[in-house]
Amino acid sequence: MLKDIVGLKKNMQRQINLYISKFAKNIEQPLCGHRDASWMAAPPWLSDYTSVKDICNQDEVECWKGDSISHRDIVASGVLTVKHVGVVGYRLNCGSDAQAIVNLADRWGMPLFFPFKKHWNLKSLIQEITLGPTVISRQNRRRAVLLGSSNVGFYHFLTEVVGDWWFLKKMGFNKDSFDLFIIHDGGKTWQKNILDLLDIEKDKIRSSFGFREKDIDLVIPYRGKGSPLNVPSWTCRALCEEIGVQESQKKGYRKVYISRKDATRRRMVNEAVLTGKLEKIGFEIVECENLNVREQQDLFGSAKIIVAGHGAALTNLVWCPENALVLDIHQESPAVPCFKILGEQSRIKYVPIFNAAEEIYRYGDWKISEKAVEMILDEVAVAP
């Protein structure tokens, strides 16, 4: 009897693996082409992106990372609506890099392949969504929208959740269009700050980390998400229109160094070598971890020079006054160009500093080199 059960489970796993491999080369089709799906194409200007290839051609240097195989490009932008969907959301891990993974199933309980994630948990679908056809009348079904991708860090949450909501509004949707807002989040205070700024009704918000629902009509802003290598050309505009600071608040007089010393990874272990010199020329040393979203906006909105190690806090450069100077210290080269792209959209002066550190430690901690310190001081010295 036990052997029969084990054999049945192995056979089921083989069938799942076959199902995955069958569609692995074209992961979008089972969702976009599903019988219960409808598609609303976005106009060309909403489908415009700046890619790492554009940046490399512009700079004519080999300092930026190429395309990553862990992310899929979305070849078309629009709004996808899938009826009779079952949703299972869960937390991939509990660390600082926790991801909100959403699995979808159709009305027959079969998995729908969702492109905005890196990981699968098809077991959760089988366990938590009963197999077999089920249809609830449209009057009783709820309409939900899924905002964001599987990444829940500051950069991704801000650009993808806020970006998705702005994108939907440009496509003709509003708050009354949905009964539920399923948000990829991690329960962080700053995430709640951002959702408050979006003015979405709190009783409609559901975290995808613990969301379980069967037979809903799911609306998905379908566009490139999850990769810092391909950034929508309207990202800065979207953030500023939805939750931005007023131009009158941008004064541009402070010199600020953003520290990561209390972060869980990618810390500059010899930071004092740099901060000691910067403090002597009037720099404030600030940690964004201690600031709410509005305080971070005020900080960057009042800065004329920002120096920071490469990290999510630099997403805030979109609030900087025009022509502000932002120095982004990369631990190594080639590097990710997302902040360079945002800097160009924001019309600031973005300068990457490539550290070429000899030592990289556990958790990505690193040492800044003497050469990088000199480069930073030189850039600051000639800044207007």
Image (cartoon, grey):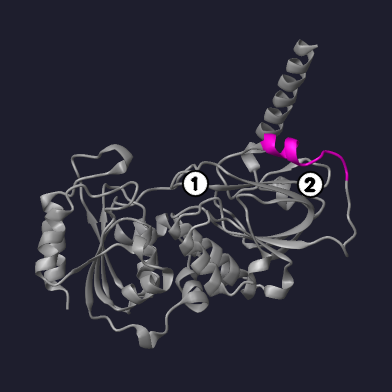
**Numbered range of the magenta stretch:** 122-133
List x then y, in percent, for residue 136: 88, 55
Mark nearer the N terminus (2 vs 1)? 1
Residue contact at pointers 2 and 1, CB within 8 angstroms: no
Mark 2 burial class by Cα count in 10 Å: few <14, some 14-19, many 20+? many
List x then y, in percent, for residue 37: 77, 55
* SS label for mark 2: loop
Q: Is residue 99 left or right of residue 57?
A: right
List x then y, in percent, for residue 164: 58, 65
Label 2: which residue?
106
> Which one is nearer the viewer's eye here, 254 or 247?
254
Amino acid type at mark 2? Asp
> Which one is nearer the viewer's eye here, 147 or 189?
189
Answer above or below: position of 55 versus 212. Answer: below
* SS label for mark 1: loop
| Image quadrant where residue 349 sits | bottom left
Amino acid type at mark 1? Ala
Residue name at image x 41 percent, y 55 percent:
53
Label 1: which residue?
98
> Which one is nearer the viewer's eye here, 53 or 322?
322
| Image quadrant where residue 279 sits | bottom left
Q: Is residue 109 left or right of residue 95?
A: right
Residue name at image x 33 percent, y 46 percent:
265
**Quarter of the image with the C terminus in it:** bottom left
